[in-house]
Image (cartoon, helix red, strand yellow):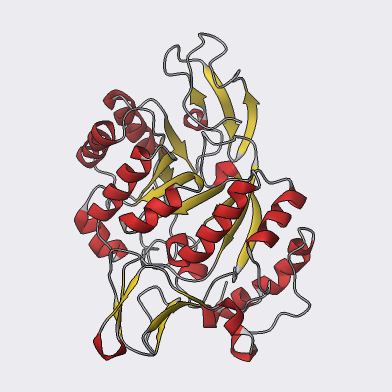
Amino acid sequence: MNRRQFLKLPCALLAGAGAWGISSHTCRSASGDSSEERFVREAAFYKKLDQLKVECHLCPRRCVVADQESGWCGVRTNHGGTYQTHVFGRPVTIHDDPIEKKPLFHFRPGSNALSLSTAGCNFECQFCQNWEISQFRPEQLPAGYGFVGPERLISAARRAGSRSIAFTYGEPVIFFEYMLAAAKASKQAGIPGVMISNGYIEPEPMQQLCEVLGAVKVDFKAFSGSFYKRWCRGTLDPVLKTMKQIHDKGVWLEMVHLTIPTLNDAADETKALCAWVMANLGPDVPLHFTRFHPTYKLTNLPATPPETLEKQYRIAKQAGIHYTYVGNLPGHEGENTYCHKCGKIVIRRIGFTVVEKKLKDGKCPNCGQAIPGVWD
């Protein structure tokens, strides 16, 4: 897909979105849309500096931004010493996805999540599967859905029968104000918000999100600072702190590790990761090892061999992690949820589809062991 084809996507999606009550009469390019001001709000978490500069305190980059310039993420701009977000209510893609696609395996399994993203990201992962969204700025992608405020998202979720609203695809940290407002409203409506994130966020904004989100899945890149620096242009330690914060606040958390051949698949690194999880998050946080496919700027490596994922799966189990999964291998036994006490299957999956769910009141029907998760 080239850029011209991608920019046409929001127009093509309007027909489907119209069924949820989200559509616009026209699909204009951002450059020709004079109503971009409707998406602008003052940003949260920044400090005013001298000479009309600002310092962003949303993510660990702590961007210092001069007047009329933008931060790393491309969606937050300094206007005369006032920092502004340009993507409040401005999704560039909306879909109704199985929650298993996120993946969240212990959060309302078998349900769908109304899923959305704005443009932008605070990482530049060389292997990003959603680079057409994350690595573009708002002015490069048309606002084909018009203004989609929190109430419109809730109405759309109800029409679709979605049991959650997922902030996903790109990086929701960078549309914090929009996500927070939507999550607050959706919580009150009984449709919890879930954040699918790289976890690169400062503690104070994460604390506000913990108060309103139903679940968080962190795309954990590697248990290696050098990997984060080389392949994502980020740092590891803030992500570890975020996961511990989420867990300590009692918000449901799952981790996904995209395993890339030769880059983050070493057995010793996997053992170190599992040891950290056990020491800081405990045995009940699900850990997914998923298969890499060549994409974006990382096309010179093959897809991950299934044997590599299976080895990581065994390492995690041996480390004491109760709920370990293998992903992007439809039909593999590692997609299923097993009772960690008796070993019986309690949820059977094929790809993103739940084909059998045996849980009774959140417990294994065979031995009565409680299975951690959000099952209501």
Where does the C terminus fall, quadrant-wise? top right
Judge by depth and name the residue closer to the eye, 196 or 320. Answer: 196
Above or below residue 165? Residue 298 is below
Q: Position of residue 308 (x, y in %)?
A: 35, 39
Q: Is residue 73 visible?
A: yes
Q: Is residue 334 left or right of residue 159?
A: left
User: In which quarter of the view is residue 110 placed?
Assistant: top right
The residue located at (47%, 40%) in the rendering is 327
Judge by depth and name the residue closer to the eye, 340 or 167. Answer: 167
Above or below residue 174? Residue 205 is above
Where does the N terminus fall, quadrant-wise? bottom right
Q: Position of residue 199 (x, y in %)?
A: 36, 54
Q: Position of residue 347 (x, y in %)?
A: 57, 25
Total labels drawn: 0
Q: Is residue 302 visible?
A: no
Above or below residue 207? Residue 172 is below
